[in-house]
Image (spheres, grey):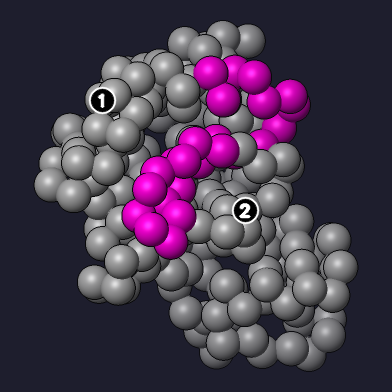
Amino acid sequence: MFKLPDLPYGYDALQPTISELTMRTHHDKHHAAYVNTTNQILGERGETPSSLEDVIRAAKDKGEQRLFNQSGQAWNHAFFWACMAPQGGRPSGALAEAIAQFGGLDQLKSKFVAEGVGHFASGWVWLIADRSGALKVTSTHDADTALVHEGAPLLVCDLWEHAYYLDYKNDRKGFLEHWFDTVANWSFAEQQLQAAKGQGQAYRYPAPQA
Ligand SMILES: [Fe+2]
């Protein structure tokens, strides 16, 4: 069944933006629970799907909310870990060109932070690319995932309080600003953009194991 993917860096690697305690709690408790519950639901049904992406899309199509929530959260968190890096860097190449449509990185940051701050309650704030390669900032509620909506996800930040409350208390804006400036993984976002244009493979959750 589906495995909880390891973080692509150490638990303390994103400090001071995100503390080791937050990363340990978020990955080992929250994310693990979503993966375990997804496996439990599939196990009870005797199902052995070939990918988590298939599980999420089928659950959405059939209106299976519990499975959709658990599998969506399993995917969103794995994608979120990939969207961060200890040295996030700066956008370059085709991604930098696409970001110019907003006026530049500072303007994209303002839009991304405003979307995240304005999002009521739990969810996710996304940077996505539409079919033409144009970028958009959007947000989804609870476990909903850009995977099942129009456009290709390039970057996401977690808006659930468990993502920032230990470090920032109720200051979601401060969290999003620091996150965007320091740990957003722009080379990953660029790979995702290239994949959306047919060059290379988009992110996929690790395949299930027997
Ligand atoms: Fe989370």
Residue 61, placed above or below residue 155:
below
User: Would you call the spot at circle 1 few (<14 residues within 10 Å), some (14-19), or many (20 or more)?
Assistant: few
> Judging from the image, what secondary structure is the residue with disc 2 in?
loop
Quarter of the C terminus within the rendering: bottom right
- Does the magenta segment cover residue 129? yes
Q: Is residue 195 left or right of residue 177?
A: left
Helix, strand or loop at mark 1: loop
Name the residue nearer the viewer: 44 or 180.
180
Q: Is residue 145 magenta?
A: no
Q: Can see residue 151?
A: yes
| Residue under the image location 50 percent in, 57 percent down | 151
Q: Position of residue 110 (x, y in %)?
A: 42, 17
Write down the quadrant of residue 55 in the picture: bottom right
Q: Which circle, 1 or 2, is nearer the viewer? A: 1
Mark 1 highlights which residue?
104
Give the residue displayed 30% in from the left and 18% down from the top: 106
Q: Residue at x 79, y 73 (%)?
A: 61
Q: Which residue is mark 2?
A: 145
Q: CA distance from mark 1 to mark 2?
A: 26 Å
Q: Which contiguous range is marked in magenta?
A: 114-138
Image position of 122 (left or right of 202): right
x, y percentage for residue 62?
Answer: 84, 75
Q: Nearer the viewer, residue 154 or 210?
A: 154
Which quadrant is the N terminus positioned in?
Answer: bottom right
Residue at point 62% right, 58% down?
149
* Furthest residue toward left: 93
Q: Amino acid at mark 2?
A: Thr
Lower sequence index among marks 1 and 2? 1
Above or below — where is 173 with respect to 140? Answer: above
